[in-house]
Amino acid sequence: MRRNIASLGALAALLCGCANIDALRAPPPAPRSDNTAEDRDTVAAVMMASTFQSMQHLTQAGPAEQAEIVAAAREAFQRSPQGSAKLRYALMLATPGHPARDPAMAQRLLRELAAQPETLLPIERAVALVELAQLDSELGLAAENGRLVQSGEQHADRDRNASTQRRLQTELDENARLRKQLEDAQAKLDAIANIERNLTERKPANEGGQP
């Protein structure tokens, strides 16, 4: 459990560190290299930033818009049931606060992705493993709580049941806090992508002005 939470915090810290506010105030970074692997990683980071933004919007939108967001992710997954599309759909299903949330299905999809890491880029694999750890913890505690209720021992084990519920709530609160950190990191990634796009657009203009 603590290792899962630590991994979540490490990922959030890594993302936040990569998009430090001070760095955004510093001179713009060098133009993107032509290295194919670096380009793929940059695209994946921007895509994950967009996914985090969609997850945040999913928790705040009205029921009709929530249904549209999940439906769009599901349709993309059905067209291409692997890799990035599969990860995005799983993350939509795992996001709290909407009627279509299905943590068990999200867990199954993420486990399939974890078993095929070659279908994801590094940042996508990291996000998939973090979310899977969260769901494993949440569903494990929920199952334990359900067993206590079904066994008819809720009165004799009231203290144990209450402890399990507190642990579940603590996990959910921690997940919400770390998800907020990821959303903050997403905003910073958006800013970095915008800076890079501006640099790319200015470069041809500067070259054209040389004698």
Image (spheres, helix red, strand yellow):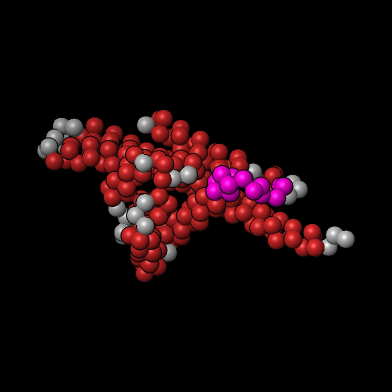
Left or right of 92, for residue 53: right
Observer-nearest of 109 and 146: 109
Report the label total.
Answer: 0
Which residue: 23% across, 37% down?
144
Place of residue 141 in the rendered image (x, y in percent of width and height, measured from the top left): 28, 38
Left or right of 160, for residue 87: right
Observer-nearest of 8 and 129: 129
Residue 147 visible here: yes
Observer-nearest of 72 and 64: 72
Left or right of 165, for residue 154: left
Quadrant where the image shows the C terminus: bottom right
In which quadrant of the rendered view does residue 190 lie? bottom right
In the image as oriented, which residue stretches furthest toward the top?
A: 3
Quadrant where the image shows the N terminus: top left
Place of residue 131 in the rendered image (x, y in percent of width and height, measured from the top left): 40, 43
In the image as oriented, which residue stretches furthest toward the left?
A: 152
In the image as oriented, which residue stretches furthest toward the right?
A: 211
State which region is magenta: 29-42
Residue 25 visible here: no
Which residue: 49% across, 41% down?
122
Place of residue 168 in the rendered image (x, y in percent of width and height, measured from the top left): 32, 39
Whether the magenta-drawn stretch holds residue 38 is answered as yes
Whether the magenta-drawn stretch holds residue 78 is answered as no
In the image as oriented, which residue stretches furthest toward the front?
A: 211
Place of residue 184 in the rendered image (x, y in percent of width and height, measured from the top left): 55, 49
Which residue: 49% across, 51% down?
48
